[in-house]
Amino acid sequence: MTNFEREPVDMQSINDTEPPEGMIFDPDVEVSATASVASVSYDPNFVVPEPVDREHAWDILHQTPALPYRHWSWPWSRENIMHEDAAQLARVTGSIGLAISYAIQEDVDRVVEICNQTGAQVCLQYSPWHHVYNRYDPRGWPMEATDELSLMSEKCEEVAAMFVTAGALPNTIGLCEFDQEILRNDLDENGNPEPGVPKPDQQVALKEKNDIVYQIFKTHFPDVDVMGHGFGKGNVHHNQDDMHDGYTTTEFYHGNQRYLQKYLIADLVANADEWGLEKLVPSISMAGYYDMFVAVPLPNAYVRGPGSEYAVKWTWERGRNMWHWYWRNKAASTEHGLKTYGPVHRLTAGYLWPYPFNPAHTGYEWHFLAYVWGSLNHKKFENNWVDSLIK
């Protein structure tokens, strides 16, 4: 395996192995992966063209190698799932994001087809407590709490059945992700957040409800890991003793803060070590999305092409510093590398938010391509668009 290839996914058919007890996939259905979408080897002499528009960026994916590490994703739009080049995007990232709340059989059929073609895996997403309950306080069991969990269980059961109908392989679904950003453990006597002051009774109630969410996932997708967004020290929506599968995440959303990354990664690693977590997955935003649409708008947060040295340049550098083997090895083996880049060698996968090639997200395609080619440290040669970003 070269430094630029992802570890291959085990794509054996369900007839090649005995399914575990409780497997949601029907062992009598014969399916096999065709791997009909060829991998793209890294060519250090390749001249990366600058995208002229969105569709041209999709075309460039055909010549773009896969990211060195799998990048899970926020749910793709139906437009992206049905795009003729969707398999190329899945090949590059190693995953397809699918929302449990909105999935239909047509989506699942297409997603399974792409995964069989590429070896990508599905990241299922659900937002518990956002649909019916939608309140901070985790204590008590009003009817809305029961309805919330019933809705989640029904949707998971429906989607699990869709994957069976689509003839999915046992490992087609690689991750269940939930962003529980409603229930808290730090409310004062008036019901207002009091950050940094968790309350024991709220921690107990929060654990109970988060654990049920985890168990619902495991009931319907028993052999799939579950990742809670933000799980780790200091997150008021989770407790250390919540049921989990060893994942912790943090948000790398600010496109304008070049040097913030190393401190965020250091905090992520410290929190993972304190909580005993080994799967570190940063949530990554590109093209200044967070700065432009969530926080305070900043100039040049997303500008296309070589005229945008500021934003796109840092996106290229972020991809390089986090995922290229040379910088990861420097961080792991030298004090200077650790201080300069942070403990990037501890990161195990990425998570893309918003989802890649979001059609409503101006400039994402430029940033995404720069990020991928940055992860390969690709920068040389005249007329190479990526090279213009780092001069």
Image (spheres, rainbow, N blue to C red):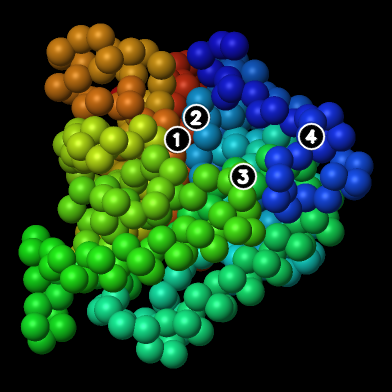
Residue lying at 76% horizontally and 63% vertically, measured from the top left: 161
Q: Position of residue 134 (x, y in %)?
A: 37, 82
Alpha carbon distance from label 3 to label 2 = 21 Å
Alpha carbon distance from label 1 to label 3 = 19 Å
Q: Position of residue 140 (x, y in %)?
A: 31, 82
Q: Which residue is mark 1?
A: 349
The earlier-in-sequence mark between 3 and 4 is 4
Residue flagged by tag 2: what amino acid is it?
A: Tyr
- Image check: 219 left or right of 264? right
Q: Which residue is mark 2?
A: 69
Residue flagged by tag 1: what amino acid is it?
A: Ala
Residue lying at 55% horizontally and 58% vertically, measured from the top left: 217
The residue tagged with tag 2: helix, strand or loop? loop
The answer to whether residue 7 shows anywhere in this view is yes
Residue 223, numbered circle:
3
Relative to 55, residue 368 above or below = above
Relative to 331, residue 128 above or below = below
Which quadrant is home to the C terminus? top left
Residue 51, numbered circle:
none
Alpha carbon distance from label 1 to label 4 = 28 Å
Residue flagged by tag 4: what amino acid is it?
A: Glu
